[in-house]
Amino acid sequence: MIFCDHYEENLENLEIFHLLEEEMTKYKTLNHEKIQWDKVYEYSLDILQNNSMDMKIFAYFSLSCLALNNEECFKIFLEIIIFTEKLFREKPENISKTSSILLNQKKKYKQIVENFINEFNKNSPKCSQVAAKSLNEYFEKLREILNCNFAKLNIKEEITQTKQSPLKSPVTQVNIDIKNTKLSNLSDREYRTLLNNLAIELLENNIENTNAYSLFAEAAWGRLKTLPPHSDFVTKVRYPDRNLIKLLLDKNTNELDQIKCFINNLSLNPFWIEGFKLFCDFLHHHQKEHSLKILNLLTCNFILKFKDITKLRFDNGELMCKEDTFNYFVKQNQETNKKTLTTSDKNKKVEQILIEINNENYNNSLFCNINSLIAMAQVFETNNMKNNAKIIYLQLVELMEKTLLKDYLSDEYNYAKNKTNKKI
């Protein structure tokens, strides 16, 4: 598991930070029992991985591990201890070059460990013997870094069981009864995670399933109504962490895992258009041309929907969508967004054209079906079969209204909608 290797003090621009703080305001109050510790675990881990190795956030994570009392929690807690021990030992300047801030973070780190040990020894949680021994070893290493002495974790001998149920993660990103839950009732985070999980499941069943990319695009951009606020076009949106960029460019990860990595991380960085170009480059490199076409078109439509994104910058001054990135997505789609029949097509027999349309529908995916319907309707129109064309346009409108593509293919949708309203 990869964690953020630096400390970022200001997390105010993160929705997930505010959700985490909202839960933790209940801590040691009359609402203490109402704390959703699985959410605290999820939110704090997300920030520690992607945004900041802030000891305040780690303290929240530590409390959630103790509250959830799950073996998997303590394994992740150990991973963070191993990571932070090395970080404070080898690169303390990553936490801060200001001595007062560094000392403050060390003080919080010490309190986290002390509290963890006290609660652990008091309650004997469900932590494996191996993990507990490793924690003791690293707490010993931390004594020198934090200039203090820690008590030992009391480790009980494990009783071997003939049958042990497989370990499950303490947090499933989304736990929703789809039959009884409207998508509109989901939070933005739940909505995004649900669609990401569906996209990944489709790809795990069939890595060539292009429908997954429509779900991914909806996860990234579906709930966005406006661009982020700015001051002189500089927003408070953080530029992606260098470790994330390194992770996305990793050539040693297998194909499916790397696609999952792109999906999970880009959906959290919807305004980083360069990241979507990296994804397209990856798909092209692995000869996934059908998936590439769909992702390219969906990204193009997002850019055209929010054209001012080309003017906006991240908090570090980097453009959200550079000119060459804009050209990569938009210019190559200008001719394909609206399919028109060429002169040679008009001279062909209708039967031959329909056969070609059928052949172009290479995988019967949602995206290909929509393109086929558009092409078929245009064939009928060109050959003065307007009744047939209108029937196709009606089917097209109905299909797009039931799918997630409607918002992204708004030009095609409006075009078909207008055709259905015209008198024959």
Image (tube, helix red, strand yellow):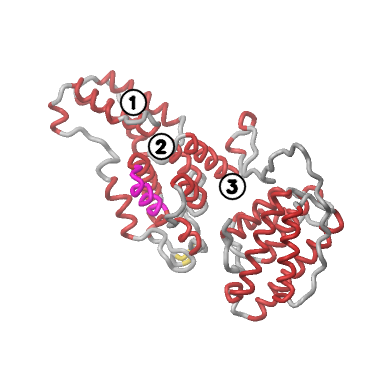
On the image, the x and y values in percent for residue 146 come to 72, 75
From the viewer's perspective, is the residue at label 3 or at label 1 nearer?
3
Residue 393 - label: 1
Residue 189 - label: 3
On the image, the x and y values in percent for residue 343 come to 13, 33
Residue neighbourhood size for the residue with mark 2, other residues' Cα within 10 Å, grouped as few (<14), some (14–19), many (≥20): some
Find disc 2 in the rendering and name its residue.
Answer: 208
Locate residue 236 relative to residue 86 in the image: left or right. left
On the image, the x and y values in percent for residue 236 come to 52, 63
Query: Disc 1 marks which amino acid?
Result: Tyr
Residue neighbourhood size for the residue with mark 1, other residues' Cα within 10 Å, grouped as few (<14), some (14–19), many (≥20): many
* The image quarter in which residue 108 lies: bottom right
Secondary structure beneath disc 3?
Answer: helix
In percent of the image, x 40 and y 51: which residue is there?
Answer: 279
Residue found at the very far bottom of the displayed protein: 99
The region drawn magenta spans 276-288
